[in-house]
Amino acid sequence: MKKEINITIFIIVLSMSILLTIPVYSMEQSHKETNQAGGWSSLDYVFYKQEQDLMVKKPGSGPIKIGFTVREVQEVMGVPDLIDEEGYTFYYHHSPIYFGTDWRVRSWDNRYGNLKVLPEVEEIKLGYHIWKVFQEKGFPLRIKKENNSYQLEYVDQLIYLNEMWLVEAIQTRKITEYEQNRADMDIEKYLQEFEQFLKD
């Protein structure tokens, strides 16, 4: 009976000593991994990257722009999840930021929406519907009807639509001071001008 109790106690003590050493090893191992190319383990030591981010991030900074240095990028995004030094690339949750050999930002891929960057404006193309034009460029300064087509007047472009409200021509224009001031008009002034246009 005594012998069985001693064996049971020995097994319990051995099991506890093994269980106590596993978390220490995991934590040390994850800390070593974090120092390798900026990587980190979400399972072993999730707070390590958060602590690093607090040290480098600047609240309210951003968005990332072309020509930013590594330091400026980290002030916006924090420490990258992965650094590819040979490819001059930072990864933030699979979204890459590409640097030149001088380690200044030259481009990025934000298809997953992880990066703090300005939204890309799509260029207006022939055949676009008027709603797509409004979505990309906002409401025009003026709308004029010319024969069977419509002219949308923007600060930088004149866009012509056919009877089906599809883009049939685009003309680039020079910006005057008057037109620049009109670009800052609020919606109420636009509506007043549009009402006047309908009366004329």
Image (spheres, helix red, strand yellow):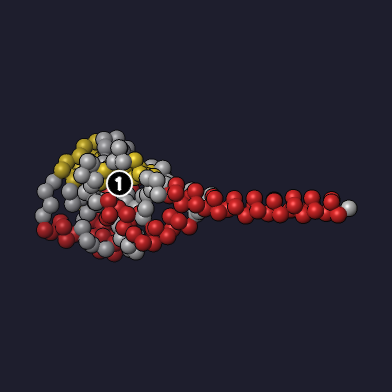
Give whichever of 183, 114 is nearer the camera: 114
Whether residue 82 can be seen here: yes
In the figure, 149 relative to 17: above or below? above
Tell me where residue 115 appears, x and y as whole percent.
36, 50
Image point (84%, 50%), residue name? 4
In the figure, 10 relative to 184: above or below? above
Image point (69%, 51%), residue name? 14
Q: Secondary structure at mark 1?
A: loop
Q: Residues within 10 Å of mark 1 (few under 14, many from 20)?
A: few
Residue 188: which quarter of the image? bottom left
Image point (20%, 39%), residue name? 170
Q: Is residue 124 left or right of residue 24?
A: left
Image point (18%, 46%), residue name? 157
Give whichever of 11, 195 is nearer the camera: 11
Residue that lies at the very extreme toward the right in this rendered image: 1
Whether residue 122 can be seen here: no
**Amino acid type indicated by mark 1:** Glu
Q: Is residue 185 left or right of residue 97?
A: left
Tell me where residue 145 appears, x and y as whole percent.
22, 45
Give whichever of 117, 76 is nearer the camera: 76
Residue that lies at the very extreme toward the front in this rendered image: 3
Give whichever of 55, 117 is nearer the camera: 55
Q: Is residue 10 left or right of residue 176?
A: right
Query: On the image, numbered disc 1 is attached to which residue?
Result: 120
